Structures are given as C-alpha cells and as structure tokens.
Amino acid sequence: MKVIYPGSFDPVTFGHLDIIERCSKKFGHVIVAVLNNSSKKGTFSIEERMELLRETTKHLGNIEIDAFSGLLAEYVEKRDCNILIRGLRAVSDFEYEMQMALVNRKLNKDVETLFMVSKGEHVYLSSSIVREIAAYGGNVSCFVPKPVERALRDKFKGGI
C-alpha cells in the first residue's frame, strides 16, 4: 500500500522522522511530499528540504521524497495514491487537520486521511520552534538530526 505524508518540513524534525519511520514499517511505499507554497518564504528552499529529507531517511528503503505545489487533492490524484498521513501533536492539531481532511475529501471523494499521534517526547516540537531557537544561536541537537542541525547552523551563522 502506498501513502503520502505531506508537509512543509522546514526543517524536518525528530517528530517528522518518527512519523516517517513508523509509516515505513506499516506501508509498502511512503511518499514524503514537500509543499512548495509560493506565498511563503521558507528558511530552506524546496531542494534543500528534499535533500535533508533524503539524507535523514536514507536508512529506510521504501521512502520517496517528492515536492508539490497547488492543491493536495490534485497531487494525490496525480500520484495515483488516495491515502494521506497526518501527524497529530495536540488537540489543536486535530481541529485543523480534521478540517483539512474534510476539505480534501470534498475536493476528491477518494481521498482518505489517516492520523498518527506523535510520541510523547515530540508533542511540543514544531519546525517553527526549531527555526526560532536556531536563529538565536540555540542548541537544536535534541530536536533535529545532525544534517539538519548543521544546515540550520550554516543558515543562521550570521544571526537573524
């Protein structure tokens, strides 16, 4: 079975990797789809995010890294895969993710969204928190893998 785990992954965190690794064990093929949102300027380019994901998931044999822009419901159709994976950290995530799941299903009646609950140690973790800590020169080694830590240090070596 093939599934899509979409997100911005700016940057990829241990929380994201936990979901990817768990999906890798449960599904035959996992597409990690990086959202290219042209209205938002990311810390890392799409290419940089994809490379960091490739580097941090290379130990998993059934992971594909891809990028998309536009509607997720259309990307799902293009990839001939109708199962989405979304991670939940807190109740606030559920409300937003439920709304998005219903919208995606309205746009494409075949789309199913499966929710995976984050492990307790990742519940508070978000890419925006990691970016802020890194921007102020803080230690992010307990939040992200080494390649991401190095990339963040290089990105913010001049400070914010």
Image (cartoon, rainbow, N blue to C red):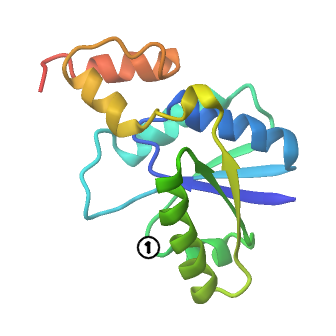
| Residue 155 seen in the current view | no
- Is 39 in front, or is 101? 101
Would you say 12 lies left or right of 132 here? right
Pointer 1 local density, CA inside 10 Å: few below 14, some 14–19, many at least 20: few
Instruction: Give how far across and how far down residue 45 sits, in percent.
Output: 34, 44
Q: Position of residue 154 (x, y in %)?
A: 28, 19
Percent position of residue 83, x then y:
74, 66
Q: Secondary structure at mark 1?
A: loop
The answer to whether one can see residue 133 in this image is yes
Instruction: Say which of 27 and 46 sits in front.
Output: 27
* Residue 86 in picture, x, y percent from top left: 62, 55
- The answer to whether 118 appears left or right of 46 in the picture is right
* For residue 108, above or below residue 53: below
Residue 133 sits in which quadrant? top left
**Vertically, is 97 above or below 48?**
below
The residue beneath circle 1 is 70
Residue ID at (25%, 30%): 132
| Residue type indicated by callout 1 | Gly
Q: Is residue 149 left or right of residue 110?
A: left
Image position of 22 (left or right of 31): right
